[in-house]
Amino acid sequence: MSMTVRIAFGGMTNSDYLLGALRDMGAKVPSAGGVRKTASNPLVATVEIHGYRVPIKRDAQGNLFLETDSNWMPLQAASFKQKLQQGYSIAAVKAKVAQMGYHLSDITTLQDGTVKLVARTWR
């Protein structure tokens, strides 16, 4: 028996960052025209991950979540969640750094999976 499972990520509210992280992970992400950014519609977009269509929705508080079948385990794996959270965080840092007048000159993934970001001012 399968049921619908919500995979929530508290604090993820920016659909551009989430879709970018999913794209970097190899998911097929819709173009900007296929993304809904209105608060009145809970469905933000549908992405394809490993050939499986996964809706991305927004809850009443504005947080984004993925909805999947309980039988499809890859989305429920801790490694998937961590990689997605990391990709989202990197996108958020890139945007904030640019807003502050800097750019990321180096992004390095260390052996333990930690990501090192180096920001510099424009010259």
Image (spheres, rainbow, N blue to C red):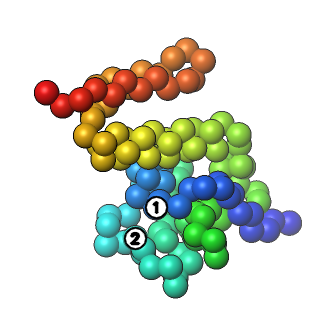
Where is 115 relative to 15, above or below?
above
- Quadrant for the N terminus, please: bottom right
45 or 88, which is in the foreground? 88
> For residue 35, which numbered disc appears in the image?
2
| Mark 2 vs 1: CB contact within 8 A | yes
User: Label 1: how many residues lie within 10 Å, few (<14), some (14-19) or many (20+)?
Assistant: many
- Type of the residue with mark 1: Ser
Asked whether the viewer can see residue 71, the reply is: yes
Helix, strand or loop for disc 2:
loop
Residue 71, how many percent across, how many down?
Answer: 76, 57
> For residue 15, which numbered disc appears in the image?
1
Q: What residue do we see at 13% from left, 27% from top?
A: 123
The mark lying in front, picked from 2 and 1, is 1
How far apart in space, not on screen, are marks 2 and 1 (Cα)? Answer: 8 Å
Q: What residue do we see at 27% from left, 34% from top?
A: 103
Left or right of 66 on screen, residue 43: left
Where is 59 relative to 77, above or below?
below
- Residue 120: which quarter of the image? top left
- Type of the residue with mark 2: Val
Q: What residue do we see at 57% from left, 23% from top?
A: 113
Asked whether the viewer can see residue 51, the reply is: no
Residue 88, how many percent across, how many down?
Answer: 49, 46
User: Label 2: how many residues lie within 10 Å, few (<14), some (14-19) or many (20+)?
Assistant: some
Where is 62 relative to 116, above or below?
below
Q: What residue do we see at 60% from left, 64% from top?
A: 63
